[in-house]
Amino acid sequence: MRVFNFSAGPAALPLPVLEQVQAELPDWQGSGMSVMEISHRSKAFIRVAEEAEQELRVLLAVPANYKVLFLQGGASGQFAAIPMNLAAADATVDYINTGNWSKKAIGEAKHYCARVNVAADAGGAYADVPAESAWKRSEGAAYLHYTPNETIGGVAFPFIPGGNVPLVADYSSSILSEPLDISRFGLIYAGAQKNIGPSGLVVVIVRDDLLDRARPTTPSIWNYRQMAADGSMSNTPPTFGWYMAGLVFKWVRETGGLAAMAERNRSKAQLLYETIDGSGFYRNPVAKPCRSIMNVPFTLAKPDLDKTFLAEAQKAGLVNLEGHRSVGGMRASIYNAMPPEGVAALVSFMREFERKNG
């Protein structure tokens, strides 16, 4: 029996996609082989790769002057690849810190850049986004990096930053959740394991004029220009993840595209937040304007009931609700593949649990 999986990642995948993969797995398109067994250099797989890229370009309306790369190493690999590709060793780079993943990106950048300026720091409990007017940006920074949606703390930017330097964004936990104007960015990247597909794959969308900035010491498999020239195949790519990503992109398009997806996601999040806010038993720590529609952390009024909550939720078919080890409490990740019925079931369980234990 399928459960409602609220994992932050690897996360739930669309059931129609899983069913298609299951049907095709031993004999992909009459080849007598699994898609995992065919050469990445074959015409058949190159077609898979090109179709996946085209699906994503259509979904996000990616301008022609951007390259779309399908790479390995997840988003964490890009924490190092980005400074190596976009900034000289003696450059200054600006970062905004609004949570655990911002902090990790900042820490990695310090290995590669002479000066990493934290232009704004939400600090402490990571409960909001500092006002852009208060940011202390560097003159002549190579780029500005931020994390639009923090997976752990559930903090989301209610705006896209401005400025005259390339804007770099880690969209791992919010890509494809709503329409996005790619032209506002120099580069966005996203680990696949939340809204795209299996873990290990990372998608990078980078503007053409930034491709010549890479340092001579940048490894070939991290060099954006090299990877773009080689169709993301300078080495053997994560073929199964790439194949599945294409199926997920197609599913998003066939279910109405990003506008329809955004409507469903906002509706799911609204139901959950209204339940939390209308309760004296549950609490969400994030300032309302900065609440994520993808990751919803919450705590119980009686923390000693946390284990009971999780155990009873699991029995009810609601799994992976435990908050990140660094913050505790609960977290419901309600990505694209989480159906409205799953959130409705969670809300019903929460109300009954409060009735019995509040």
Image (cartoon, rainbow, N blue to C red):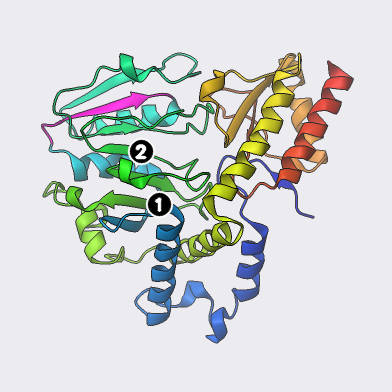
Label 2 vs 1, first from the N-terminus: 2
Left/right placement of residue 70 relative to residue 110 reads right
Left/right placement of residue 201 relative to residue 177 reads left
Residue 135: x percent and y percent? 30, 18
Under circle 2, the secondary element is strand
The circle on residue 202 is 1
**Between marks 2 and 1, how big is the CA–CA gap?**
13 Å
Mark 2, Cα crowd under 10 Å, few <14 / some 14-19 / many 20+, is: many
Under circle 1, the secondary element is strand
Residue 156: x percent and y percent? 48, 29
Q: Are marks 2 and 1 in contact (CB under 8 Å)?
A: no
Mark 1, Cα crowd under 10 Å, few <14 / some 14-19 / many 20+, is: many
Q: Residue at x 71, y 32 (%)?
A: 271
From this viewpoint, is residue 144 visible?
Answer: yes
Residue 269: x percent and y percent? 64, 34
Q: Which residue is mark 2?
A: 169
Which quadrant of the structure image shows residue 140? top left
Q: Is residue 38 above or below residue 241?
A: below
**Which quarter of the figure is the C terminus placed in?**
top right
Please state which amino acid type lies under the numbered disc 2. Ala
**Tag in front: 2 or 1:** 2
Left/right placement of residue 256 relative to residue 143 reads right
Q: Residue at x 30, y 38 (%)?
A: 168
Q: Residue at x 52, y 30 (%)?
A: 152
Q: Which residues are magenta?
A: 89-98
